[in-house]
Image (cartoon, helix red, strand yellow):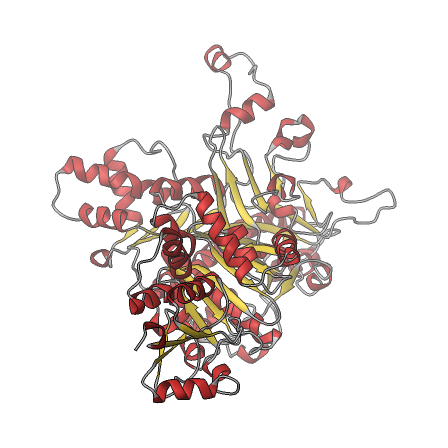
Amino acid sequence: MPKSTQFLFLLGGSDLEMVEIKTLLEKAQVKFIDAGLNWNNSRWDAYMKAPYIEEIQQSIASGVKVYGIELRGNIPTGCELIDHHNELQENPASIVQVANILNINLNDWEQLVAANDTGYIPAMKALGASDDDISKIRKADREAQGVTVEDEALGRLSVEKNTIKTRGITIVKSLTERFSVISDILYKPYLKLIIYNEKELNYYGPKKIEIAEKFNDLIQDGKAYQGGGKENGYFGLAKDVFSETEIEELKNRIVEHFTQQDYLKSYYSHHVFIFPFKWEHPGCSSENSLLERFNLNTLPNKLADSFWKRKTFKIDGGETYNEFNYFYGHVREILYDLSDNLKDEYSDGDKKMLLHYEYKNEALKTWKYIIKLKDRDEVFALDIDSILLNFYNSGVGVISFHLRNFKHAKPDDILTINQYGRRLYPPFFDLSDISVKTGNQDTNTLTEGLEGVKGKELPEYISIGSEENHKNSVLYEDFSRYTSGKAFNYGIFMLPKFINGLFPKDFWAINQGKQQLQNKEGKIEFKLLMAPILDSRMFVVCWYGSDHKADDLKNYYTNLDSEEKENLSHWWYKFLYVDAGLLTCQDRDMRKNLIAKGTYNRWIDYGTIIGLSRYSFVMLTSESVDSYIIRHLQTMYYKMAELCLVQRATILNYADEVTHVSHLLLENDSPDKTLEKIATL
């Protein structure tokens, strides 16, 4: 029997590989049928009807081998499938399989075509293809798929106008049905790329196999497909199978998958910066009762036109259940703005002890908490988990920044973030050497003094905003306001812009005398009065996962040489007492005692160690620690730290009130007012 009648090939959807297979069959004079299919309608069904079915059935009856190339659906009796997609992705390219059946050697061009179809540009590069060769192959492939000049233009426009980047994934909403134009324009090794429109979706890039496994049920039902190898490849949804809403949902699920997977691997540390402060309503004097000065009932109206939204605590899942159950009943009403259904016998009727707010600006999803040090190129950019605000009826408030670190893995990076990211204002100004030694007046200007402290104790700036444009943000604070002599007319504290900018204009009155609180008509312009309670630093709550440092701390508690043991303690001391750079305690015995006093090493054999100081609550674990341990720090441990700070701030606040009441008792001018003040303490 002549060679040309031994086989019958049924061609699948047109692309460069199928064009070259057709050319190969023509040269070898082998029979084939081309139904003019594309990728979306490349199915066996297309050949199981007139005008093709009769020839196929006769060929099978006469012993001719019938091969369908890249056809989807049920394989008809007497036929065989040639493919390298979905469950057959381990097979060589279809053109290679056809060449092997016909015992034909492929030329260099055909080998590049095969590499392009199974592994795209990386596979061609692996064969040593030049950039010019790759460009020619990709151009020919697009033409074979039916890409027009208009498609090329729409593809470029899609990239220019409809591209977003989120969590390391590039997403393009395509204006053309020919996605290959866009994938070729944007190609980079290891790029995660999603291209979609209202009818279909494709993912291109690394870890394609994870996506294919996630949606394997769709592949089995013929609603999706995959190819291109396990590591780098593509996954796609069949055209016209899903609604626009369903495609959007599936796209989000793909993004969420990579977000979770990548974040689990690169989630290095969690940071909470807590700022406790005193607050009261303007227009009140020390003669007013505490109930009047710290009245919570009018606060919601004052925050109504802002991004601050009140959120009461509700048990809506396992996380909130665990957190709520962790604390005794009488503590919960101090820690949480409880919803009405959670109030119990410990709650004081309708009396509110606190109001809880969350900052709900949509831009927060893309903003970063950015720390820049003087004379260092590196910028520390942390993802913002949330920004919270609590008002207590004791005249104490707390603002807290909850931040996730996915970029900075080094142990010293964590120290730097904690040390400089907590700063509210300059702790001091640098003085000239000559003035210190001679006793003469300092010759440094305020600008020189500020620059001297930057890099030692103060960052160059702290900002909240996009990484690209954060210097133009209203939340950008470089502390330059402290170089003006007028800045200190009413005290040394100015609310940093990365806090003040979160509130409506003229919301807070800071370090203002009474004469500054009123306009010319005598009306109060500010909504609330604020003053810091502690010092120039926020309190730090931090988790850091590091196998190396966890092992170091394990070794610290074994019988090591004393000198080596001493070296291992240095980093932990800095972490515990929020140092960066030099140790601020240079006495070995004192440092040893401070470490012992502030360290809770119950779980040291598991690689988990906790530290508590007046500056911080820190936890070091191994990188593979169970996630619930980290969650404990983010919720319960943070709340415990906040409770201690609120208690400390309240005591300091009440100390001022006790002093004032003592003066009233001595003056005894208004006994009724004095008794009322005592009653509200």
Residues 357 and 405: in front is 405
Whether residue 504 is visible:
yes
Residue found at x 39% / y 68%: 29
Q: Is residue 618 left or right of residue 550?
A: right
Q: Position of residue 253 (x, y in %)?
A: 49, 69
**So how many labels did they put on this image?**
0
Q: Is residue 12 above or below residue 300?
A: below
> Vertical placement of 401 versus 421: above or below?
below
On the image, the x and y values in percent for residue 313 come to 54, 71
Residue furthest toward the right? 521
Can residue 401 be seen by looking at this rendering?
no
Image point (55%, 27%), residue name? 450
Residue placed furthest toward the front: 2
In the picture shown, does residue 441 fall above or below 173?
above
Identify the image quadrant of the C terminus.
bottom right
Q: Quadrant of residue 581?
A: top left
Q: Is residue 98 left or right of residue 170?
A: left
Q: Nearer the viewer, residue 387 or 557?
A: 387
Task: Report x, y in % for residue 221.
Answer: 44, 82
Between 136 and 233, the residue placed more toward the observer is 136
**What percent of the width, then of the height, locates residue 404?**
46, 53
Pick whichever, 425 or 628, lies toward us.
Answer: 628
Quarter the N terminus occupies = bottom left
